Structure formats: C-alpha cells, structure tokens
Amino acid sequence: METADTEKIITLLERLKTSSENISEDELISILSTTVKSCHVPCRDAPEDVPYDATEFENVAREAEMHLCILLRLLDSINKAKKEGQKFSPQFLKGVIVGCVSVACEYRDSSWEWSNEQAAITSRDILNKLCDFCECDNLQVLLTGRQVAEDSKEDVDVKRKETDDEDFEGYMKFVLEKLSESLKKTTWKSYPAVKMVYLYMLELLDHRSISKHLPYLLPPALFITDDWERSNKALGLSALRHILTNAPSSELRFYGRAAVIFDALKPHLFAREVEVLDELYPTILEAAKVLEADPSHAGKLRSQTHYEVILEQLLREMYGEQKLALRSLYSRTLPEVIAAMGIVAVRWSQDLMQIFQDYLATYDGQEAEDRINILKGIKRYVQECWPQVHVNIPDITKMLVRLVYDVTDEDSDVEPKAINIIKQNKNNLGLIINIESFGLCNIFPIP
C-alpha cells in the first residue's frame, strides 16, 4: 500500500471516530477496496509447475495483520453508523461484504503457509463482524440465506430482523464471481489462497443451495483434480464428491455434467497413490450412482454399466498387488463397489472368486484387516447375488475353511480380536458350509 493511501486511511479513521456526520459511501468504499487489495495474498512469482512452500509467503501474514486490523476498524465504524440510523445502499453492502469475505477467508486458517495465528484471529473477527452487521447467525446464513440445524437436516428459518427482503438469497454468487477472476484454468496455481477460499465456500453450500452455483463450482473442481500434485488431486476429488453428494441428480445429468465428471475421473483409476485413490473411489462411485439413476436406463439391459467400469479396473489392480497399503485400500473398497452394483455383480463372479481366494489365503499382519474386509465383500456378494450364489458355494466353502484353519493354527500370530471378528463374519455369512442342506432361500432370505 502506498504512503498516500495509508495517510488517507488514517485520516478517514480519525474522522469516523470523532465526527457524527453520515459516512460517505463513495469515500468509504474507495478506502475499503484499497485495503482489501493490499490484504490479498500476492500472486506467486515462481513457475506454476513448482510447488509452493512457506518461504514464498514469509512476510505476507505479518503485513496482512495491519491491513486486516484496518478492515476491522472500518467495519466497526460502518456498524456504528448503522446503529445511529444511517441507511446504506444495497450496492455498497454488496461491495463491503464480498470484499471482506474474499480476503478474510484467505487467512482464516493459521496452518496455511501465508497466515499466522494473529491474522487468523483477526480474519474470524471480521467475518463475525459482518454477520453481526447483517444480523445473521453465521457466515453460512450471510452467504446462502439458509443454515443447517445442528440436530437435523431440516430447513431452519433465517432470522433477519428489521428487513423487508423476504427472499434474501445471500451473497454467495457475488463471492464466487469474485473468486472466478483468479480461479481460472491457466492461472489458479498462482493464487493458492484463492483455491482454499473456494473450497471453504463449497463447504458452506448444502443440498438446498448448491445447484444454483454449479457453473461457478464445477470447473475449478475439475481442473484442480486434473493437477499433477497429489495434494491438489485429493482436494479436487473431495470438492467433486461434495458436489455429487449434495447437488440434485437431475441437475448433474442436465447438460451432461455427471458424464463429464465420470469421464474426468476414469483416468485416475490407474493412479498408484493411496491418498488419491482413497478420495477417488467414493467420488467416482457417487458419479456412477448419479448416472445409473438416469430414467432412460430403466428396463434396459446394457452390456456394461458405469459400476462395471470401476469394478473391472479395481479387480485388475488387485491381481498380484504387492504393496500392503494398496492391498488394504482395494480390499476396503471392494465391498462398497459390490454393494453399489447389486445383482449385476454376478457377471463378475469368476473374477471375484479369484480375488477372494487370493486375499483370504495371503497373510496380511496380525490384525488381518484385509481378510476381514474380503469377508465383508463375500457377505455383500452373497446378499446381492443370492439367486446365483449356489454356483460358487464349493469355492466359498473351501476359502472359509482354509481361512479358519490358518488363523486358528497354533503357529498363527493373528491377534485374538481379529480371530473373533473373522469367526463372527464367517457366521454372519449364514453358515455357507451347510447351505446345500438347508436350502438357499432359507439361509439367504430375499432382502
């Protein structure tokens, strides 16, 4: 900030403190805009293909502390003027709220490289002051016009005192428009703070308010997911899952948005990073769920569903995998994929039996987590594919008997707790060993 601007701000603050006259909106918005501009985390000078670190933002937080304090004092003056009866135009309020929210959220977390504890505290004070000024309970109400009850997901009336605006929709649209100026495919890596503000704004949107903002939300999530850095991939996948979980399925299928998301996620099925795959599978399963719910698919027998695309690649990755972390992730994911597929999983019975046998027969440590997860996968397979499961009864029986022998052998080092869980899961399968004697439908009733 230049010396002349600093002097203007100091002069204005002193005048606001001593004068009882109405505040000039034009003068105040000019000073506030200058202060907000000085507060923003600066654009990176390093090439975009170089990950940022704390050294790039060494003095940013310290310089921002002063400007954030100025913003807080300006908001105090505006709030005081409002209490004394001064009326502010909607355009002025929008400029104040959008500018302050966009910059305060950049420093709200002290763990970020460009922030510190004091800057985070001042930023939260600014956000709280904005909520008080607009008479909103919290930032979510201020930005979306709605809030989620603590004890339920039911709608909660927005409390806005002394206002004639019954259809208040919040300022989220204007904040997202502001962020989109920097959050572009070619420039977003130069503004890491804007990325974090975008993710925070996304968290504030739930199933009642997210659909109207999809044009602003979906593109950043897609190109952040497509980045080469693992941390960015994980953040982008988390953002996409939030969108898929909260946005109405019909809205996502409109204009082919869900199909675009699914196609963008398919290449990541070949990834080998655990932290990426851990976020990927729940996200792509949500995308497949949205696509499979398309009414145009009702009553049609297709050669391959979206779930089968996921299962095919998952089974291919599970074959012969040696890394324990990946084996654990795959075994944890398999029951979820089978549950999502339903009876269609019967098409993959032969491949599933090979995976079940391989993972149950392989030692995976004292806690036997992988084998427990595979038992859950077998149970889910039996529940979903019960009309045809009798075909694979001999194979499943051999797997279970061998597993029980392995874990109860005197040379086994499997923990007693894990043994009990394995036995319990075996029993929960409905005593498959005796299934042929008692009849399929008696042991596995139709869900």
Image (cartoon, helix red, strand yellow):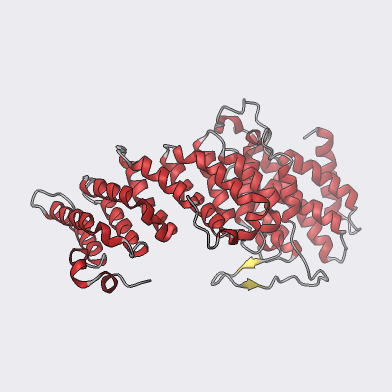
Relative height, residue 282 to residue 380 (above, below): above
Q: Which residue is most to the left?
A: 410
Q: Position of residue 38 (x, y in %)?
A: 74, 38
Can residue 343 be seen at all in this image of the molecule?
yes
Identified at 57% across, 55% down, the residue is 244
Q: Compare residues 362 and 381 and report the one nearer the observer.
A: 381
What's the residue at 80%, 41% (across, down)? 34
The quarter of the image holding the C terminus is bottom left
Q: Position of residue 271 (x, y in %)?
A: 45, 37
Give the position of the N terminus as an image quadrant: top right
- Percent of width and height locating residue 74: 78, 51
Where on the picture, by quarter, is residue 37? top right
The total number of labels drawn is 0
Residue 55 as seen in the image, left or right of residue 403:
right
> Would residue 111 be visible to someone looking at this image?
no
In this rendering, the answer to whether 213 lies above or below 103 is below
Q: Residue 363 location, x and y as percent?
A: 21, 45
Q: Nearer the viewer, residue 383 or 375?
A: 383
Query: Hey, which quadrant is residue 253 in on the image?
Result: bottom right
Q: Left or right: where does residue 390 sit relative to residue 159?
A: left
Q: 10 or 108, which lies in front?
A: 108
Report whether 97 appears left or right of 197. right
Query: In the rendered image of this protein, does residue 360 appear above or below residue 135?
Result: above
